[in-house]
Image (spheres, rainbow, N blue to C red):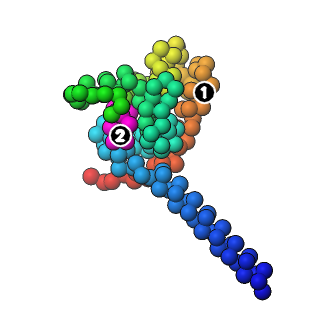
Amino acid sequence: MTRRWYLLVAVLLTADLVGLAIWLRWRREHRFDAHIRLAADRYRVDPALVKAVVWRESRFQSNVRGKAGEIGLMQIRDLAAREWAEAENLSHFDHEHIVDPGSNTLAGTWYLAKMLKRYRHTDDPVPYALADYNAGRTKVLEWLRGEAETNSAAFLQQMDYPGTRRYIERITTARERFRRDFPVVAR
């Protein structure tokens, strides 16, 4: 009888731990949804795409810092942050202000929107914008030869950075997963 009691307690504790782990993951993945929605609405970007970039760049850790000076959820560099602050007429701006999740998602989404507009002449601006966000404009210009100037499949084939190609693929996959977090609201 005692063995069965220990087994029952062990099963219940395991179930509680699994439940706790699921809840913690859900909480981590959703705690910035309001910031993401606000930024996405403001700059007219798909919130699922913004959330996928946040997931890939920081795994929802708002205080993360990159090796090249990137900060926060969307890993914003100083130049991009300053461009955003200037476009928004923010005075007394410092790159460290981007640690704030609200400011970070606004700046990152503004920058992503800028990239999407830059490649709106293509069949799908998302891969181009993500490549620019990840590898930089100089590399994207190298890959924009021939059919790749407007055809995203050709662009991805031309890309000689496997890491950037994987970056785009992972964000695209995550975007589909995150669509359910931002249902379309009829207006």
Q: CA distance from mark 2 to mark 1?
A: 28 Å
For residue 145, above or below residue 47: above
- Could you say whether the residue bearing mark 1 is in a helix, strand or loop? helix
Q: Position of residue 63 (x, y in %)?
A: 44, 39
Which residue matches tag 2? 100
Residue 5 counted in the magenta span: no
Graded by Cα atoms within 10 Å as few (under 14), some (14 to 19) or many (20 or more), the crowding at tag 1 reads few
Answer with the quarter of the image where residue 157 lies.
Answer: top right
- Could you say whether the residue bearing mark 2 is in a helix, strand or loop? loop
Identified at 45% across, 25% down, the residue is: 69
Q: Position of residue 181 (x, y in %)?
A: 44, 53
Q: Position of residue 5 (x, y in %)?
A: 72, 81
Residue 109 seen in the current view: no
Magenta stretch: dominant secondary structure: helix
Residue 33 or residue 63, whichever sits in front: 63
Figure quadrant of the N terminus: bottom right
Which residue matches tag 1? 163
Residue 22 seen in the current view: yes
Question: Which amino acid type is shown beneath numbered disc 1?
Answer: Gly
Tag in front: 2 or 1: 2
Label 2 vs 1, first from the N-terminus: 2
Question: Magenta region: which residues?
Answer: 98-110
Residue 100 counted in the magenta span: yes
Q: How many marks?
A: 2
Q: Position of residue 46 (x, y in %)?
A: 39, 41
